[in-house]
């Protein structure tokens, strides 16, 4: 069985998780579920990045220890992922004992081999982004990532020799064009960060203590990005007594990250792996941002909602569908309730829900829910069966390219074709003549097969909806193509998605 290791970034424990935070994880979950459906041995990891000066300051502001502060927020994040039906195999926290020990061993290993050295850091630091910047990298004197103020830092620190590996990294980019996607992210890394010259990276701090202590110099804690990035191998038991998961799943097949942290995952992380003499992940995909009504999501702008409010109002699969269908993966996308409602009414209620309900209703009305294939052949039905049989390969082709919105479009193309097939075969007219009974049953059988195949291929994207459709069909078949020899004993139809009146 082929393995597939997929990760999201480990998230900063924000007290206000919004729909933009959910986007990356929904996409990763759909990919992981699809790979499992295709027989892969999947290891899907997400988690939380819990160390750093920013966390320590926020905890102090609310009168809690950093660990107390993050424990509460992490519990909320895990509840949100459960609500979104995220099927992760591992949730890692950077406060986990296993992770801490691994980071300390990595730091010591890199120090012993001369890739980490002691010096003094003088420069500009953005606390919200936990990022160091040079004067030339600032935009209007502000952090280029978040636009907030930076301040000068001067303290004793350990440094990692990024510069030593610059040429090797560029060579790797050239030899592995698939490593960074979309290609625009690769060009950005080369032109904005690598070609101007990599500077050695500050990898420890002494001005705060909420972090992983450096074992041989406990005045220092490990800088948050060296700490955070290594979660992808610490969780697999790297440098531990049991590294069986490391041997099984590494290298990662794909790291899915937001475009704002592509720099860390395609420059710092691969160089760390090179220094450790480990293989690099096959791909880092930097997706765009999901914004609300054209603007950044924040409470101060008045456009923040807890994602659970959308889920409570519209259903988890509707929210998942919108995130996966509305935005081409890799591009920025806009989230609005108006657009969400339009997708629910247009795609989910009208195309999908209406097809399932009226087909199953006709099955009960004309045949008491018991449908067999009477093999009445005609050109119209033959073409329709061909479309059913092509769907699996079309979806597979799009998923291989991570064109998730287009994979869903292929499924809905078949659903549209199914509705058209109803209009063209006119079952209600066939039912008026007893001589057409076999043809009518064949038509309904063909529709049920179309719905069954579509529902199975929707499983990675809309797991609850897929399950509900399969339950109504009352079938155990997992075939992703037209069978022709099975029969149906249908359960009663139920509404999958109600149309939402827009006032």
Image: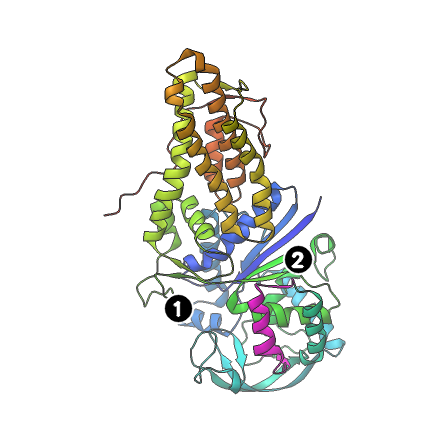
Residue 362: percent from the left, percent from the top?
40, 23
Q: Which span of residues is magenta-colored?
A: 178-205
- Where on the picture, by quarter, is residue 170? bottom right
Q: Secondary structure at mark 2?
A: loop
Q: Find out whether residue 189 is within the magenta segment.
A: yes
For disc 2, the neighbor class at 10 Å (few under 14, some 14 to 19, many from 20) is: many
Residue 30: percent from the left, percent from the top?
53, 48
**Which callout, 2 or 1, points at the residue further toward the start of the chain?**
1
The alpha-carbon separation of the residues under discs 2 and 1 comes to 38 Å
Q: In percent of the image, x 43 and y 81: which residue is there?
A: 149
The residue identified by callout 2 is 252
Residue found at the very far front of the displayed protein: 379
Q: Is residue 88 visible?
A: no
Q: Is residue 146 above or below residue 418?
A: below
The residue identified by callout 1 is 62
Q: Is residue 223 above or below residue 426?
A: below
- Where on the picture, by quarter, is residue 114? bottom right
Q: Nearer the viewer, residue 315 or 276?
A: 315
């Amino acid at each position: 069985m082929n393995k597939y290791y997929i990760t999201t970034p480990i998230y900063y424990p924000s007290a206000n998780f919004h729909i933009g935070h959910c986007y990356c994880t929904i996409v990763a979950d759909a990919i992981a579920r699809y790979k499992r459906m295709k027989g892969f041995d999947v290891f899907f990891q997400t988690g939380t990045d819990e160390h750093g000066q920013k966390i320590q300051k926020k905890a102090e502001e609310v009168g809690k220890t950093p660990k107390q502060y993050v424990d509460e927020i992490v519990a909320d994040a895990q509840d949100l992922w459960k609500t979104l039906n995220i099927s992760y195999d591992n949730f890692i926290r950077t406060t986990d004992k296993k992770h801490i020990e691994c980071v300390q061993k990595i730091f010591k290993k890199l120090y012993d081999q001369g890739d980490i050295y002691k010096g003094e850091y003088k420069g500009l630091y953005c606390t919200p982004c936990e990022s160091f910047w040079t004067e030339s990298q600032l935009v209007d004197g502000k952090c280029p990532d978040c636009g907030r103020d930076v301040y000068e830092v001067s303290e004793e620190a350990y440094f990692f020799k990024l510069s030593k590996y610059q040429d090797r990294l560029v060579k790797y980019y050239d030899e592995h064009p698939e490593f960074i996607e979309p290609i625009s992210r690769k060009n950005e890394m080369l032109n904005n960060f690598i070609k101007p010259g990599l500077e050695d990276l500050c990898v420890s701090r002494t001005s705060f203590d909420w972090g992983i202590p450096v074992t041989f110099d406990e005045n220092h804690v490990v800088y948050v990005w060296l700490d955070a990035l290594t979660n992808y191998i610490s969780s697999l038991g790297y440098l531990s007594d049991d590294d069986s998961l490391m041997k099984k799943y590494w290298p990662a097949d794909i790291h899915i990250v937001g475009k704002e942290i592509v720099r860390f995952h395609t420059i710092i992380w691969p160089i760390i792996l090179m220094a450790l003499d480990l293989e690099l992940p096959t791909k880092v995909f930097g997706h765009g941002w999901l914004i609300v009504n054209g603007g950044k999501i924040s409470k101060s702008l008045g456009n923040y909602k807890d994602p659970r409010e959308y889920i409570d109002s519209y259903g988890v699969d509707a929210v998942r569908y919108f995130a996966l269908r509305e935005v081409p993966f890799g591009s920025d996308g806009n989230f609005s309730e108006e657009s969400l409602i339009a997708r629910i009414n247009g795609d989910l209620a009208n195309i999908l829900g209406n097809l399932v309900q009226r087909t199953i209703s006709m099955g009960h009305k004309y045949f008491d829910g018991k449908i067999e294939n009477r093999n009445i052949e005609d050109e119209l039905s033959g073409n329709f069966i061909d479309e059913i049989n092509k769907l699996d390969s079309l979806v597979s082709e799009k998923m291989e390219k991570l064109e998730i919105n287009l994979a869903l479009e292929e499924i809905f193309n078949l659903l549209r074709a199914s509705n058209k097939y109803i209009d063209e075969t006119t079952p209600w007219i066939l039912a008026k003549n007893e001589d057409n009974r076999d043809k009518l049953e064949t038509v309904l059988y063909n529709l049920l097969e179309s719905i069954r195949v579509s529902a199975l291929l929707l499983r990675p994207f809309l797991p609850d909806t897929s399950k509900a459709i399969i339950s109504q069909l009352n079938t155990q078949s997992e075939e992703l193509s037209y069978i022709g020899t099975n029969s149906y004993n249908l359960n009663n139809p139920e509404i999958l998605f109600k149309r939402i009146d827009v006032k």
